[in-house]
Each structure stands twice: as structure tokens, then as C-alpha cells.
Image: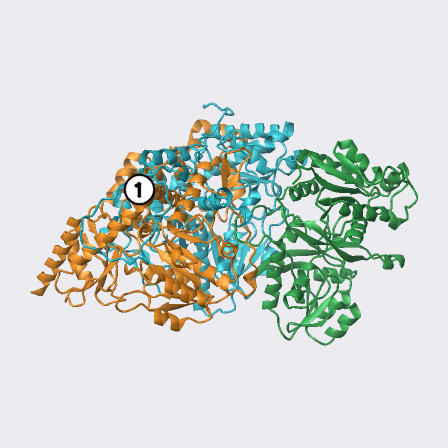
Amino acid sequence: MGIIKVRKYHQAKWNEPIIFQLNTPDERGFIIPYFNYKKKINVPNKIKRDKLPNLPEISQPKILGHYLRLSQETIGGNIFIHGEATCTMKYNPKINEIISRNSKITELHPLQPIETIQGSLEILYRLDLFLREISGFDKYIFQPGSGAQSIYTMASIIYKYHKVNKNYQKNEIITTLLSHPSNHAAPKTRGFKVIDIPPDPETGLPDIEAFKNAISKKTAGLIICNPEDTEIFNTKINEITKMFHEVGALCAYDQANVNGLLGLVRAKDMGFDIGFFNLHKAFSSPHGSGGPGSGAIGVIKDLQEYLPIPTVEYDEKNNFYYLNYNLKYSVGKIREFYGNFNVIIKAFAWIMSLGEIGLKEVSKTSILNNAYLTKRILSEVKGIDISFPKSPYRVSQTRFTFKKLYEETGITVDDLSRRLADFGFHTYHSHHPWIIPEPFSYEPVETYSKDEIDEFIETLKLVVKEAYENPEFVKNSPYQSSIHKLKDLEMLNDYKKWIPTWRIYLNKYIKR
Amino acid sequence: MKKEFKHPYIPNTSSYTRKKMLEYLGLKDIEDLINKIIPTNLRFKGKLNLPDPLISEVDLKKYINNIIYKNQSCEDLLCFLGGDIWQHYVPSICDEIGMRDEFLTAYTGSPAQAYTDHGRFQAQFEYQSLMAELLDMDVVTMPSWSWGNSAATALRIASRITKRKKVLVINSISPERFNVINQYLYPDLKILKIKIDKNTGMVDLNYLKKVLTDEIAAIYIENPSYYGVIELNGKEISEISHSNNSLLIVGVDPISLGYFKPPSQYGADIVVGTLQPLGLHMNLGGGIAGFLATKNDPNFIQEIPYRITGMVDTLEYDEFGFEEAFYERTSFMVRESPDKSKEFFGTAAGLWAIIAGVYLSLMGPKGMYEIGETILKRTQYAIDKLSEIDGISVPKFKSIHFKNFIIDFSKIKLNIDEINHRLLKYGIIGGLNISDRFKNNALYSVTEIHSKEDIDFLEETLKKIINENKR
Amino acid sequence: MKMITKKKIGFILNPIAGMGGKIGLKGTDGIEIYELISKLGLEPWSPVRGLRFLEFLKKLDNNLKIVVYSDQMGGNLVKNIGFEMISITKNENKKYTSSMDTKIAAKKMLEMGVDIIIFVGGDGTARDIQDSVGINIPVIGVPAGVKMYSSVFASSPETAAKITINYLNGNIKKTIEAEVLDIDENLFRNGIYRVKLYGFLKIPYDNVYYPGSKIPTSENEELNQIEIAQEIINNLDNNIYYIIGPGSTTKRIIKNLNFETSLLGIDIIKGRKLIGSNLNEYKILEIINKNKSKLIITPIGGQGYIFGKGNLEISANVIKKIGGKKNIIIISTRNKIYKLNQKPFLIDTNDKELDERLSGWYKVIVGLNEYMMYKAVPSFNLHS
């Protein structure tokens, strides 16, 4: 068994200057190959840049060093357990990185002749087949670059579907307050009115009666997470999707929280007509400091004609893969080309590595890890409670509340998360809105070993102890991080004071 | 007794650990736990038809490589395809930083991210700052999913600011990008096309003046255009636009801006474009990201849905931190705006931003000038060389071209697909078939990776193919 | 300017938490009041609440100057906790405190330029402060007393302390108008217990449950109200009379239509025109007599009452005339709903049967094209 201890950690602290401050006139980072063509090209001055851009001049090794140092000041998901709940920060296998760096993947133009990209098209098609199995849907595409863009795609499909079927009065989408905030924002962009259903204060689940009252002949669709943010699995989901189908509405599934359900429940069985996976979450592709990601959208047969173009198809007779741009009611293009292949290949490799039994094991272990984490936290950590105690069972993460800690010490979850950073840990609160006061969550996925979970819990206990004994200390943390506590946060909100670029900083705060 | 499944990615499949955890929870089997969460009527009891797992990396790598070796990349073939994604050289430092595990596996949104992720925040702030210098604009946001997405959002922003519901878009825009914009703007906003001059391929100014009405929120042009044409009349277009109280939005290829004037200097209000040329591998269309820049004007800023990294002081003197700026989005325009939403955002292209920042740092001012110049010269060389071929006309437009240019094959009996099919036999990927716009024309592209020999080889191959066909 | 000065706050403790005057406890003092109050089952009592507030405040920031009126009205507690203190009166050892003291205290604190006034009390105290300083200075109430209908109270003494600190250090920049409700004295003298909307106090805009929102929605209360008003206006049926209830959210509709009425009165609009304003029950019934009408209301006060507190002109008769639940449109800013802490809206029309018929799920307008399903229940169903 491994050692479990609370670390005497210090993050790399380089006090690294901003890249512009490394400027040294006449240094070169990169030389462009010269092209010896003598012909004079008459470029009028009005379109020629009259002054070189004010980029810094820095030599190559200095640039490398600068960015390497910045990377040291970043706690990624592989260097230490991450735990940012709802983001599914799991192991991003290195073999998948190596595979995806092959020039036969990186140096492909999306519009190359089809016969030259048969390998990639095969992978796209086969991943389509894999995901059909996992969800029960009939066709997948990978065009959206993220979950939010996937939700927008689903809203677009719902919109087009009703337009084609002349259901002109159907302009309302119903979602829940505890589904991802984009479930609310994206349909609104598509022109829908959005109705939120709040959680029942006892169970944490949206009330069936509320759905009954919200659904009308104007209802176009449902867009929902199950489980929602709180990871309480809604066992009545079939009842709910049925209600929507009865008024001719479509049911769309945001599967951001699928990590505990792979192979255990299928989207189609819950009554959904359309759903998406975040390939950069449950399917192990790395998060990339905020992208690129990938949204895989699956639909039932009746909705295939609405998908964004193109789809990848297989001509079995000739053993040939091709792109199909002829979808009768296609919503058009959500984004250029047909997907982030660099992300997609990693999801494909991950599924190939695990197989059916592995996927089920991923979910089972996530559930087990979370149950273990939850029980230990509730029994051993002071000042914390579970949200919605009437629903004690959660899937792969638990939303806690540190309300008691706050009332007894004045320490907020923001303070706690800063102090936890002093030990290398990330945490998470909750999506907006915060229905639960002082929310706190941790998602142990299937990646973190028992020892690592134990270390997190021991550290959390220590930090909570500090909160009770020395709140002032916790309040002004972090102390072992790359930087100290931020101050004057209102600077970020005031366009007169904010600093989004270095040039604004120079203009506003230096040049006087 | 079922053999227990163990996998290197799942530490707690260790029977040693599993036993301890179940004991702690007082369970015999995980099934007991799952049954409390997932009702039996929803539980999937069947078998997923997935291939047997390749648990060993040895097998996995071999298996997947066998599939991808069916591909022929732009390293195996000589590629002249461009359009709105190109084969550029990716500097080794860009690859190296793009592979750094910390940047690769970090995320956004955790509450103490200013501390745990200080490095990537700084790298992203530097991206914003470096792009700001290249574009000569004060505010640069974190990138969106693509050029088309940024352009579409810029148009919606313009609608919210001006409260008008029509936009003008240059008709030379790529079909991919137009499709994205169209999808996003429908049905709240109407898109009208701006004609280009038949000879120059630049914006037809007279036409523009004719179609401009007080319902137009913005004019969107591209420079260089999809056809590779450098727009010379940016200033005039800007004046025409502003005298109508419409905004000017310009889409650019950033790799041209070390040499050519950034649109802010001829009056653009919002500038968008693609980050792909700045150090991102094409990845079959995965290496794309859209940037958006504008001025430090609250009327604009409060309409932007994208994330922006802001610099903040810390308790320590001479230290700075970063966080996401939550500038006041108190737009009171929402009442009369045809666009009633504030759009949405999410995970997009954080890593690509970092890499683009590295690229700009490597290039520096001189490098950006040189790469613009070398591409310009190579494009010109290609045009000049190819115009030596009888029977084709190049370039289609009498203008300065950058990267992209159109070859008119309409006098040749072969159609574009046939030509490309034959080119492929010689190991060349020919230009994009744009017959939907110009019958039997193709869009070719040349970047800094195309040497004189490459271009000469294209010329002689095309000549050969055309001559073969004459008989 | 000057060297770093401590922030100055005003602290008013009403030792008899809001019930004193009404139940005629004037004139008694000392231990007897407290014994009597606790005998009447009025828990919690204000000094305990006040103490909790000050203790938590000290934890968050012990570098404040606190202005009090007298020892009795909070001075003793402040001294006890150890804050730097300024007392307006010099320990006159008054036997009892009255409304007048509260009003003078508030006015003096405003003159002394305190940044914010915190009071410990109930609706009565809120009303006294509203009477004397109106919306000229930010105020926050530490809840003490039995029923607090006004929406000027924080959810707990600790939350009041947090809001105070956040306001002082600029984390909260905005203030909003919050309703002050209290027992209608005229009716009370006739033996009828009804709660009336008296006016508004300015309170810090505490969006505790929406901190640092990372999605582009309106976190701004005023903008939220404008959007809601616009949603209503976009969907008006020109053949219907709309009764507009009191409150800043509802009156934004009137403002968006370019009219000016009072925040407290009931108005009626039709086809974007103002038909009548500040109407009583009789006038309302007269106007909507044979016409199709709907009611647009917003919860009044901090308890989430949609009927029965503060909008008495919208009587059971009026509600029955408009046709009940299906013609009632509830609007509310999101922040107001979140502050209810998942507790439902309350109904108290004085007609129990009607209360039952009106309860259930409502599609509440919370923004432009944005709705939230929210439950309303009869208040008599709840335990106190």
C-alpha cells in the first residue's frame, strides 16, 4: 500500500515576467526560409504595414524556458489528482498522445481527396458505431467543439424539426436549474423561450408536477442532464420523457455527467431522442487548458436527416468511407469541417483499450470511489453536510455544503479552495446558480487510487481544522502557491480599470 | 468465479484496494451500491457490441497505427489545398509547449484556478496581449471554436449594439464559413451579400453603397479574401460603413499581418479570423480556432460572450495574478435588439491560444514580416509560373494575392475532379474545386512550406496532364 | 487625501424586537420586558441576534468604527465585542427606547456619514428607519423578532455581517430597493391584522448565490427587471386589461411604457396605455368589471408572499373577478427567488378556499424569454 501523507508542498514559483518584458532588441526566435524571387510586387503603401508590430524580440531558448516555467506553474490533471467536479478530470493516457502526434493524423487537410484519408474516416465511422452502442442512438457526428456548442446543436435540431413539421407554436424549451447553465443559454440563442425547473428542496430532483405544469402545446423540447449537477440520478426520467413525447416534443440529453453510467444505463432507454458526449470528459481526451474539446452528437433514426453536414458513411460493398453532404433537413454547419480529429482519435483509442468490460468498470469504479470519498468526508470532516440529505445516493460525485463551517468560522468555500491549493489540490463548488450555500464537490473519477483519495481527505481535514482554529490564516491563503491571494478583484469587472492585454496595462498604469 | 478485470488506467481495480473499499462501505459487491442508484427498469442488462479490449499498449498502438497508415498526409503528398485551413510549418517550440503535460491536461473554471493554474493563465494572457499587438487592438478575447463562429458572434454583437437586424457579408466568403454564419444568425438576422468586382475580386464599392440601408448593423469583409485577394480599399469601406452608422467587421488571416496593415488601422471595429496558421497542425480540421478583437469600449465589451483573461494585483508587491474578467454585461440595449440573447460559451481552444502565443513570441516583429513577405513572394511565383501553362488562366482576379489564388481551368476539357485525380497519381493534392462558384475553377494555396522545386513540379505536372488530354 | 481611515458603520439595536409598541409594552423596562417577551414565546430576541452579528463581523474584519445611539440600543454589545465605538448620546440611561429614538438614531448616522446602517429588529424597526432616512443610505436588517415580512433582512446575523463587509470593501457595489412591510395600524386598531407595504429601503445587492457568474446573463437587478418588463410588453394582448401590482419589478413595466406611477399603488394598463393608477379595490373592480383581465404581480417582502402582504387592494374579490390562477402572471427577478432559499411563494387572501385554488406551480417570468417554474402554497399550511 502506498504512503498517505499531507504534503509539505510548494508550487513552482518563478515570478515569471510577462513575455514582453523579455524583449531584447535584435534577438531572433525563428528564421523564415528566404525565397529568392526577384520580381517586384507592387504593394501599395496604404495596405502595407508601416510599422512592424510591437511584438517582443526574444531568442529561441529564452522563449522555450519562459513557457516551460509557466507550465511548471500549472497543475494539470496528470501531474496531480485534479478533482474539479463536473469536469471529469481523469487520466489522459500518454499512448493516445503519441498515437495522435503521427503526421498521418496531424498533417491532414479536411478537404483532401477522400481516398487519401480512409484511415481517419474509418476511425470516425467506427467511433460513431461505438457511441451508438453505448447510448442506443442510431447515428453520431462530431462537428461541435465542446459541450456548449453541442447543446446549441441539439437546440438547432429541435428547432428545425418543428419548423419542418410546421409546429410553429412550439417555441419553448424546458430545462432544469441544476442542469448545466449552457442548457439554458444555448437554446435561448437559438430563439427559444427557456423554462427552468428548480430542484425540490428535499430530494434535489425536479418535481414531476412542475414538469406537468410547464409542459404545454408550446413545448418544443426538453434539454436536461441526468444526473444533474448534484449527481442525484433521476429514477423518474422515463416518466418525464414520456410527458414530452405526448405533446410532440423532443427530448435532448446533455451527457456531461456520464462517467458513472457507461454501460450501465443507455440514453435511448431513458426516452431521449438526441444526446451528446463530451469526448474531452468521460472519454479521456485532455482538457487542453480550456479546449480543444469535442462534442459527439447522437440521434435516433428519425432525426438523422437533421444532423449538421457532413456525416461519415461507409460503403460496405466497396469497403470505402466517404462524407455525405446530402442530409435533407440538415441544420447546416455549426462549425467549419467535421470535428476535432485530434480529440476524436484519443476517445477512439481509449474505448479500444477498455472495451465493454472496461467501460463498465470505469463507471463502477467511479461510483465506488465517490461512495468511499463521500462516506469518509461525511464521517470525518467537520462543518460539512451533504446537500439534499433526502437523496443520499449519488452517482460519481457528491455536492456537499460547508454551510455549518461558514456559520461557525466565517470561512467560505472560496477560502477553503485557496488553502487547498497550498497542497496542490483543485476543488470545485457548483455551477450557477448556487442553490446550495457554500457548495463543495470533488469528482474522484475512476483514475484516483484509494491512497490519493485518502491524501485528499486527510488534507481536507487539516484545512478544515485550520479554519476552526485559525480562520484568519485560511482567509489569506494561499501561501505555497505560485502567487499570493488576489486583491482588488473588482478591477476585473470595471472596464475603466481592467487589464485584458499588456498594452492596456502599459497605457493605463505605466505611461503617465 | 468471474475473473476480475484489471486495467492500468483504473487503479482501484486492484483486488487489494477493492476489498478494502468495499469493506469500509459495508458492501459485498459494487452491484449492491449501483442498485441503490440506478433502478432495475433502467439498468442496461445486455452486452455492448464493442471490440475486445486491447489492454496492452503494445496491441493498441499497432492496431490503431494499422488504420491510420491508410492515410496519406500532406507530408506524404505535396498539398496545394488551402481555402481556410493550410499546411504551415509548425515550429518545434510550438510542438514542445503544446505537448507539455501541464498545459495539455489543465482545465478552467475551478475556484482557485488563479493559483493552481497561474502558469496557463499567464500564457493565455500573453496570447491575448501578443495578438493585440499583431492586430493593433486593445481587447482580444480567448478564442472561440472557429473563424466562422467568431465571425457569426461578431455580427450578432453588431446587431445588439446597433439594434439593426441586417448584415452585409462579402460574397467571396468560403462556403464553410458562410454556412456557419448563416446557421447562427438565422432567423433573427438577415444576411445580404456584397458583390465583388469582376476584375479585381475586391469589394465592389458602388454596389456596397447601393445596398447599404439604415437596417444594416455591420459590413463583414475578409482580407485577404477567400480567393486570396488583398483588399486595398479598406479605408473607403470603413468610411462608407461608419457614415451609415454600421460597424465594420473584418476577417483576417493573421499570418499576413506582419506585412499587411491590420484592419484596425483602416477603421475596423471588430476583427476576427483563424488561429490555425499560427503554429497549429491541421489535424483534419481539428486544429482550428477563431479569434476576436475589438476596442476597449464598454459598448462593445459588454456584448462579448467569450472569456477574457484579466490581470489582477495580489497581496504581494511586484506580483501579478490572473482571473477571468467578469466585466459588467449591463447592456440596456436588450430591449430593442433583434437578438434577444447574450449567446453562450464553453470549452473552446485554450491550448491553441497558448500555442499561438508561443508562435508570435518566436516570430517577433521581424519574423512576422518575413513570413508574410515570403508567402507573398511564393504566391506570386506560383501564379507567375503557372500562368506559363497554356490553356489555363491564373490568377482569376487581377489583384495582389496572398496564399490563395484561383486557377481558371474552364478552357480545359478536363473537369477539376479529373485533374485532381490525375495530379494525385503524381503525388500532388490539387486545389479545391470551386465549380459551384466558378465553373471548372480551382482554389490553390501556397505557403512558406512550398519551395521553388515544389511549385515547379506542380507546374510541369499540370502542364503534362493538360497536354496529355489534348490528344 | 487623508491617511487610511477606518470604515464607519451605524448599528441600531432595538432591544424590544419590533413588537414593543404594538402590544403596548411601552413603559416597562429591565428584566421584565425580556421575561415577558420570552413568556410570549417571542424567540429569538434581538440582543442575542445583535451579538451574533457583531461577533461574526469581528471575525471578518475587526478594523471598523461603529456608531451607536446609546448603550441600550447596541452600545453595550459593541463595547463588549471590542470595536472602536462612537456613541451619539451620552448614556442618558433612558428607561425604555421608542420609535422616535430609532428615527433620530438613523437620521444622525446619516448626517455623520456612516457607510451603511445595520439594525437589529423587525418590521417595525425597518419602518422607523424607512420613515426617517428613506433610500438615502444603504441599510441591512439583522433578523430579530417573529415575523419579518420586509425584504430588508439578511437571512441570518452572520449573513448580515458578510453582506456588510462585502459592501464596505466593494465586493458588492450595487444596492437595490427592498420592500418595507408592517402591520397596517389603522386596520389593527379596528382589530384587523393586515400587512401593508409602506415603502422601500436601499439594501446592498446581495447575490450570494450567484457570485462571479461565468455565463453571460444579467446579474444586475435593474437589468433583470428591465428584461422582465420587456418580456411582458412583448407578449401583451391588446384586448386585455392588466392589473399591475406594487413593487419595483412590476412597476418597471409602467416605466418601460413611459409612464410614471408610484411603486406602492396598483395600476391598470391596456394596449400599452395607462388606464388608471393608485387604484383601490373598488376602482379596480369597476374597471375590470365586464372585461377580460389579467393580474401581474411580484412577491412582496422577504417571505415570498404573492398575495396577502402589501398588496391588499388585490383582494379575493378581484382575484375571483379576473378568473383565478390561469390569469395570474407572476414575475420576479432571479435573485429574489434565490433568496427564498427554495421556500415556496406564500398566499394569504383571507379566503382559505381561494388560497387552495391559487396554489400550485406557476410559470414565473424571470427574464427576457426566460421563465422559472415555482411553487406557491397557502401560508396557513406552513408551520411558523
Give the quadrant of the N terminus of chain B.
top left
Left or right, C315 with reference to B334: right
Position above or below: A413 against A433? above
Question: What residue do we see at 32% from left, 43% from top?
Answer: B363
The amino acid at mark 1 is Ser
Q: Residues within 10 Å of mark 1 (few under 14, many from 20)?
A: many
The chain painted orange is B
Task: Give chain C's shade.
Answer: green
Q: Position of residue A171 (x, y in %)?
A: 52, 65
Up-down relation of residue B117 to residue B347 (above or below): above
**Quarter of the image where one finds residue B192:** bottom left
The spot of residue A123 in percent (x, y) is 30, 48
Residue A301 in view: no
How far across and how far down the image is residue A303, in percent?
40, 61
Q: Residue furthest bottom?
A: C290
Write down the chain letter for disc 1: A
Image quarter for residue A408? Answer: top right
Q: Nearer the viewer, residue C187 or B140?
A: B140
Q: Dividing the image into 4 quarters, which one contains the C terminus of chain B?
A: bottom left
Q: Which element carries disc 1, helix, strand or loop?
A: helix
Which residue sits furthest right?
A: C27
Residue sitting farthest toward the left: B471
Between residue A292 and residue A490, name the one nearer to us: A490
Residue that carries the numbered disc 1 in the rendered image = A100
Question: In percent of the image, x 37 and y 65: which residue is there?
Answer: B236
Residue C244 in sight: yes
Camera-side residue: A223 or A479?
A479
Identify the hue of chain A: cyan
Front residue of A219 and A300 = A219
Q: Position of residue B270 (x, y in %)?
A: 43, 57
> As drawn, is C115 to the left or to the right of B284?
right
